[in-house]
Image: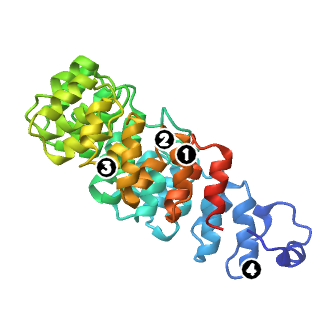
Amino acid sequence: MTRTADITELIEWTGDKKRPQDLGLDRSTTPEIIRVHVAESTDDLQAIIRLATDPNPAVRAQAYKNIVLPSDVLEFLVSRGDRGLWNQLIHHPNLTLPSVHVMLSTGADSDIAFAALNRMPSKSRQVLNPIEDENWPFVCDLVAQNYPLLLDQVAANLTSYVDDVNELSVHPLRNVRLIVANHPDASRETLTQYLDSPDADVVFAAAMHPLWDETDIDGFIDDSRLEVRLAAAQHPKATAEALARLIERDQPDAVRAAVAANPRTSGDLLASLSATYQVEVGGNPSTPQETLARMVGMGGPDVHRAIASNPSCPIGMLTLLAGSPDPLTRSLVAANPSSPREVANWATSRGE
């Protein structure tokens, strides 16, 4: 941008010239400040093209931003390999996907790749100056191959780009399949397919999907794979009967802890699990008050924190915990939606 201090010089140099293209853009006689100003303000295409090849990067940077530049000229500028100014071109509203592809296939840095993905059309988010092109999936594959740190963004973009997320159910990129498995529009057919995946994370995500009903979850209880049983133990549609049946079997500790944390677990089962899984039971809103009272008297700071955050914790117990010497316990009491204002205020004031 032209600095305020340079305005006088600009006026004196231009004199009575009215049009930027009349400013005599001879690099040997035209001051840099004039060329920068013309590059950012002129609507004369020939002047912009000349300035876009100026030896001074500050001049080129302003020329590259000029919205008058058409897509074919932008493609030419990209092909010149002026990588130092690609970060200007990548945001240009007239840039096309072939030009983006040239950048990404010839060593553009990750910032360019990130900015390129932000130009990809989406059906679920607002995109500034989207580049409409049916070949975006191909470009996403290129990004996935060359920019591993952007895999999550590639996957998110792809799943928000297609009309039906199930079209991507067999995509080779694992990150895409994980998003599909978690997607609310994933079909029963896709999720059933994922339950047979060799990828444990995909299997777990599919088994946790809200599409499954209580009968489906009941069927997961006897599955031989740990990730399916673990999903059943955590699933919000698991019945108390199914969770009790799951805990009866010789389950790994992770499954039993998940049952202890599931709000659909019965109070009697939670009471029996409270000695071993104190934190999970203490934070479970379905834990009976008498169980919580016993745990408060026996548990350490971690248990007190879990109970202090439990929205079903009775007021008397919250009042007791508000006087805890542990500042985190007090802050959890203050943040608990069941804490009366006076209890929350007292928990907060204790740390002052």
Question: What residue did someone put label 4 on?
Answer: 31
Tell me the quarter of the picture where residue 206 sits.
Answer: top left
Secondary element type, mark 4: loop
Of the numbered discs 1 and 3, the one sitting upstream in the chain is: 3
Disc 3, SS: helix
Picture coordinates of residue 164, whole percent (x, y): 36, 25
Q: Which residue is drawn at 13% across and 33% down?
A: 248
54 relative to 184, above or below: below
Q: Distance between the residues labelled 1 and 4?
A: 66 Å
Residue 194 is left or right of residue 111, and the answer is left
Q: Are marks 1 and 2 in contact (CB under 8 Å)?
A: yes
- Residue 172 visible: no
Residue that label 3 marks: 278
What residue lies at 79% left-to-right and 68% top-to-bottom?
23
Q: How far apart are marks 1 and 3 (CA)?
A: 19 Å
- Which residue type carries mark 1? Asn
Q: Is 174 positioned to the left or the right of 5 in the image?
A: left
Determine which residue is flagged by label 2.
Answer: 313
Task: Look at label 2 and name its amino acid.
Answer: Cys
Of marks 1 and 3, the one in the foreground: 3
Q: Distance between the residues labelled 3 and 4?
A: 75 Å
Residue bearing mark 1: 336
Q: Which of marks 4 and 2 is nearer the N terminus?
A: 4
**Badges 2 and 3: C-beta atoms under 8 Å apart?**
no
Q: Where is residue 208 in the image (x, y as percent from the top left)?
A: 28, 33
Q: Earlier in the sequence, mark 1 or mark 4?
A: 4
Of marks 2 and 3, which one's residue comes earlier in the chain? 3
- The local crowd at label 1, few if under 14, some if 14 to 19, many if 20 or more residues have their Cα within 10 Å, is some
Q: Nearer the viewer, residue 262 or 67?
A: 262
Please state if 140 lies on the left or on the right of 84 as rendered: left
